[in-house]
Structures are given as C-alpha cells and as structure tokens.
Amino acid sequence: MGTLTSRGEIDPSKGVIITCLGKKRSGKSKMALLWFESYPYDRVVIDVNGTDGPHRGVIELRGTVDELPTRWPEHLREDGKRMTLRYHPDAGSPTFVEDVDAVLGMAYRTGRVCVLLHEVGLIARANRTPPHMLRILQSNRHRQLTVLLCCPRPHTVDPLVLGQSDLVYVFELPNPADRKRVAEEIGWDPADFAAGVDELGPHEYLRADTNESRPVDGETEMRLVSCPALPADVVAQLDRL
Ligand SMILES: Nc1ncnc2c1ncn2[C@@H]1O[C@H](COP(=O)(O)OP(=O)(O)O)[C@@H](O)[C@H]1O
Ligand SMILES: [Mg+2]
C-alpha cells in the first residue's frame, strides 16, 4: 500500500464518480463536501437525512416525483452566478426512490453539474437501482457529470456504484462483508485491504484510484494509498457550509 501524494486530482469538466465509504461519523460526508466545494460549475445536493451540508446559499427543491422540475430551474439564477440546488426528500414518501431519481434525471438532462448524494445505499440498492441513477452510473462522463456518493454499507449497494467509481475513499469500515466487497470491486487482496482498514486512526482513510495501474520498476504504488485525516481547520470550514 502506498502513501499520499498529490495524485487523485480530477478535471471537473470531464466527469468523475467518487464514492466515500465508512461507518456513521467516520468522515464520508466531509470528504464529499470537500470535493463538492472545489467544483466550479452548477451543483445539486441530495440529503436524505436533512443534516448534511451544504445548507448556505442553496435553492431548495420541493415536492415528489410528479412535482419536481424536469429541467434545471434557470429562471432562479442570479446574474450568471453558479447555482446550488438542494433536495431533502421525504423518507416517508411512497415514491421516495422515484422522488430522488427525478432530481437525478434533471441533473442528467442538464449535464456538466456535480451531484452529491449523501446516502446512495438508500437509492441504488442491488438489483433495484432506478433508471436515472443507472444512467448516471453508466454514462456520467458523456454528460460531464461529477458524482459524489456516500455509503455506510457497501455490501448492500448496487455493485455498479463501486465498479464505476474513479476514486473510492474508505474510512472506518468494521464489517467484514463490506471490506470484502470493496476489495473485490477495486481488485485488491481482501486480507491486505482489511489490514489497511484496521490500521486507520480516527478519520484517516484509504484512497483507491481505479484509474491508476500497477507500478513498475520502483514506481510508487498509487492504486491504493493510506492518507492522514483532513486537517481540523478544513473540517471546521466544511462544518460551516
Ligand atoms: N479529520 C476529520 N475528518 C472528518 N471529520 C472529522 C474530522 N475531525 C473531526 N471530524 C468530525 O467527525 C464528523 C464526521 O462526520 P461526517 O463526515 O458527516 O461523517 P459521515 O458522513 O461518515 O457520517 C463530523 O462531525 C466532523 O466535524
Ligand atoms: Mg454523512
């Protein structure tokens, strides 16, 4: 396993899928927010719990699948400024998954936006991934979509989520089935991967870059690297968003 360098950086106009995994409060959403903040174009955040940011400077989307806009609400744009939409779905809605999928569909039609989905496990369950979520996972790049996904239990999520991810951040992940699934999907030896996860201190993480290739002739290992926790001042800044 390697150690952190500056790789893992991304061209926002290309469209990438970044997945953050780990138990509750391990730091997934903070990492996703860090990426979200660095994204220069229009953005949409879907926050099932209603507690994750950003909360400031956002335009709230409301309603269910039949009421949500199908196109980006351009009429709400203030003098050419970048827009951030926020959707807090009703977890009790009988059409909950379709509600979220409607927002994903709008993002897909729009193209070149960043989508942050704080709980992908509730939307893309194995064999039950709704159509727009599937489209995004299969062809985000054609639409220049950058997709940030958070998930506490990778074992129960559609394998396509990990299979299509460019970067996977792994925070504290105690469940063996979860570890095994991640190792399988990123093509890493399960025992070696589990040992790497075990060594993580609070909020530390492993970063898997699925676009990196096996190192040759003394090159540094970049496919899976162990990284220090985000600095406290960065986290404090993200807490205020
Ligand atoms: N270095 C750090 N990285 C991430 N979170 C940190 C760090 N230090 C402290 N925290 C705190 O830990 C919590 C992590 O929360 P969050 O990212 O929302 O977790 P998750 O999305 O995995 O449930 C936050 O309250 C955050 O302020
Ligand atoms: Mg979270």
Image (tube, rainbow, N blue to C red):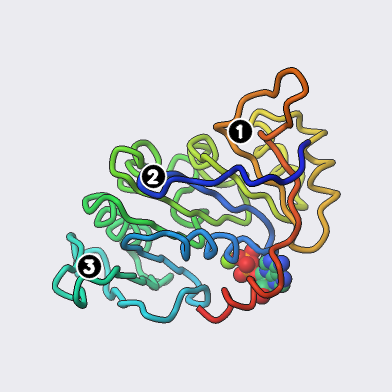
Residue in front for this viewpoint, 224 or 99:
224
- Going from N to C along the chain, the mark reached first, 1 or 3, is 3
Residue at 63% across, 71% down: 234
| Among the two numbered marks 2 and 1 on one chain, the one whose residue lies closer to the N terminus | 2
Q: Which of the 4 image quadrants contains residue 28?
A: bottom right
Checking the image for residue 185, the label placed there is 1
Residue 54 percent coordinates (x, y): 46, 74
Q: Where, quadrant-wise, is the N terminus in this rendering? A: top right
Q: Farthest residue in the left direction? A: 75
Give the residue type that dot 2 points to: Gly
Asked whether residue 25 is in view, the answer is no
Q: CA distance from mark 2 to mark 1?
A: 20 Å
Q: Give, as a three-letter code, the residue at label 1.
A: Glu
Q: Secondary structure at mark 2?
A: loop
Residue at mark 1 to residue at mark 3: CA–CA distance:
34 Å
Q: Residue at x 35, y 77 (%)?
A: 58
The amino acid type found where label 3 is placed reads Leu
Around disc 2, counting alpha carbons within 10 Å, would you say few (fewer than 14), some (14 to 19), or many (20 or more)?
A: many
**Left or right relative to 212: residue 73:** left
Count of numbered circles in the view: 3
Instruction: Give the crowd class for mark 3: few <14, some 14-19, many >=20 residues within 10 Å.
Output: some
Which residue corresponds to mark 2? 15
Report the Cα–Cα distance between label 3 and label 2: 24 Å
Q: Which residue is mark 3?
A: 68
Give the residue at x 77% y 23%: 218
Q: Earlier in the sequence, mark 3 or mark 2?
A: 2
Image quadrant where residue 23 sits? bottom right
Ligand 1: give its quadrant.
Answer: bottom right
Residue 225 seen anywhere in this rendered image of the structure: yes
